[in-house]
Image (cartoon, rainbow, N blue to C red):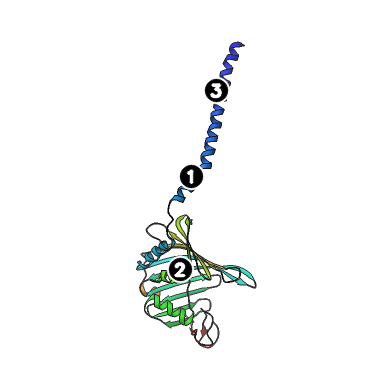
Amino acid sequence: MQMSDSIRKPRRSIVAARWCWRLSSLVILAVFFCAGPALAAESKAKAPEPDPDQVLQKMCGFLKSQAQFAYKAEVTDDQADQGVKLQYAIDLETFVRRPDRLRVNAEGDLVNKQFFFDGKTITLYDKDHNVYGVMMVPADIESALDKANKDFGVRVALTDLASPQLCEHLKKRIKHSLYVGLHKVRGVPSHHLSFDGENVHLQVWIQTGDKPMPLKVVLTHKDLPASPQWSAYLFAWNFSPQLPDKLFVFAPPQGAEKIKFVPLKTDQAPKPGTETKEKGGKP
């Protein structure tokens, strides 16, 4: 019995020591994991944040330097209907060939249209109604888009990305800039930027690295009821696509009816983006 007791006592001591060691380890781990975020936050605070205006300028410069590119976008658009804010979807496919070619295919819940710029004319085709309108425009993308907007109120989502003066246009509307942080867009590290204007608030996520392309855009209308948002995920970027001339030339489908854009300066000017048929009816 005495020998047996003497043998058991050390075992208890060993077991107790093991448990003490394990508990001590758990305490150390708990301290480590609790202190980790604080240390990381302190480390991040010391690093200077990028200037949001400079990050935006790099994006503009990168896009401007591309002779041609193509991308896709998933768009959501908030619209008010009988006092209720509803969200609709649009899929966009855009092709750009500088200095004088642009095409956009748009298909969604409320729109099914195609936009063509061939260096001489802009054509807008409504596939649902099989009607199209043509306008004469200047020979470069910037001037063509400007004329279509000012004279006829025609604007196509995200075509500003093809403008060589993209940043100049944005800066005119920005009152306050903010670098939000380094966040991910569908797994891709991106600079999250915030730009506040008089009537709108713009957020842009720009990919980090040597190809600072926009991956996400959110536009909030502050001056409208319920502050509706317009957002887009941009993906499938291609900076060496094959873009033949025929891609930007509109060929009227069988039975398509030509329409006439009504200038905004006339008393009968419709809302931006609307047209009237040559026969006088609505498309």
Which residue in the structure is indicated by mark 3?
A: 14
Q: CA distance from mark 1 to mark 2?
A: 44 Å
Q: Under tag 3, what secondary structure?
A: helix
SS for dot 2: strand
Residue 9, relative to residue 214: is it above or below?
A: above
The residue located at (55%, 35%) in the rendering is 27
Q: Badge 1: few (under 14), some or many (20 or more) residues near its Cα, within 10 Å?
A: few
Q: Position of residue 42 (x, y in %)?
A: 48, 47
Distance CA(mark 2)–CA(mark 3): 70 Å
Q: Is the residue under label 2 in contact with that under label 1 (CB below 8 Å)?
A: no
Residue 267 picture location, percent across and down: 53, 88
Q: Earlier in the sequence, mark 3 or mark 1?
A: 3
What residue did someone put label 1 on?
39
Between residues 126 and 268, which one lies in front from this camera angle? 268
The mark nearer the N terminus, 2 or 3, is: 3
Q: Which residue is mark 2?
A: 93
